[in-house]
Image (cartoon, rainbow, N blue to C red):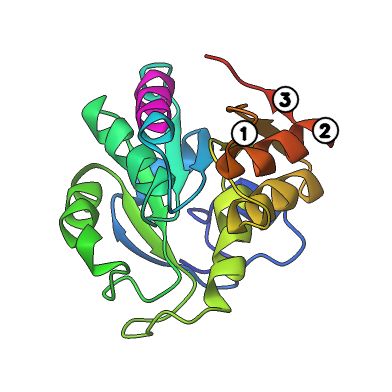
Amino acid sequence: LTIEQAAYPSLLREIYDPPPVLFASGDPMVLARPAVAIVGSRRASRLGIDTARSLATDLCASGLVIVSGLARGIDGAGHRGALAGNGATIAVLGSGCDVIYPSKHITLAQEITSCGLLLSEFPLRRRPAPWHFPRRNRIVSGLTIGTIVVEAALPSGSLISARAALEQGREGFAIPGPVNRSQSRGCHQLLREGATLVET
């Protein structure tokens, strides 16, 4: 998809630096539907994974598409929750659409393409690189009306997504956690900065 095409996601076109070209695998029609991002720690707790999964299922039941980054932990749980709820989900990659990272999510990626979309600004065969992921995060938030952070330590790539959402004029949400867990500190920082607290 090029930025000049009508099928290019309209919300993404509004951000400061939209990618001029997007590569996609799956059903591009999901780009026209309202979406919410669910992001968080790769080293998520069982509670965090269960929360992300159930929240994604409930949001899909309300007609929303779930967007995340296909990473381990919260991202994967969000995608799986959407699939469990027979909803649609978009995975934004930090690599080409034919290079699934992490490799343990190859089957999940295949399931996503059956009722959702893999999306990337990187061309086919492009391997992941550390600097790709902050760029990916602006697309995750840019596709959505809001970003929900389920678990995040300090510092965290999930906080980049949440702050990008606010810079893009989108809603920022955070789920609080136990005060003695490092994975709660990023969410609590976002709440102090004005994110909306999410309980259900």
**Front-lying residue, 187 or 18:** 187
Q: Which residue is mark 2?
A: 192
Left or right placement of residue 169 versus residue 69 in this view: right
Q: Which one is in front in this view, the residue at disc 3 or the one at disc 2?
A: 2
The earlier-in-sequence mark between 1 and 3 is 1
Residue 59 in the image: x percent, y percent? Answer: 44, 22
Please tell me which residue lies in front, 127 or 96: 127
Quarter of the picture holding the N terminus: bottom left
Dots 1, 2 in contact, CB < 8 A: no
Q: Is residue 79 left or right of residue 115?
A: right
Q: Amino acid at mark 3?
A: Thr
**Residue 36 seen in the current view:** yes
Q: Please tell me which residue is depicted at 23% across the width and 42% down the height of the picture.
A: 115
**Residue type marked 2:** Arg
Q: Position of residue 56 (x, y in %)?
A: 40, 29
Q: State which mark lies toward you, 1 or 2.
A: 1
Q: Position of residue 19 (x, y in %)?
A: 60, 69
Residue wearing tag 3: 196
- Residue 21 in magenta stretch: no
Distance between the Cα atoms at labels 1 and 2? Answer: 17 Å
Per the image, the residue denoted by label 1 is 180
Type of residue at label 1?
Asn
Question: Residue 151 appears in which quarter of the rendering?
Answer: top right
Give the extent of the magenta segment.
50-59
Say if the magenta span includes residue 58. yes
Q: CA distance from mark 3 to mark 2?
A: 10 Å
Residue 125 in percent (x, y) is at: 31, 85
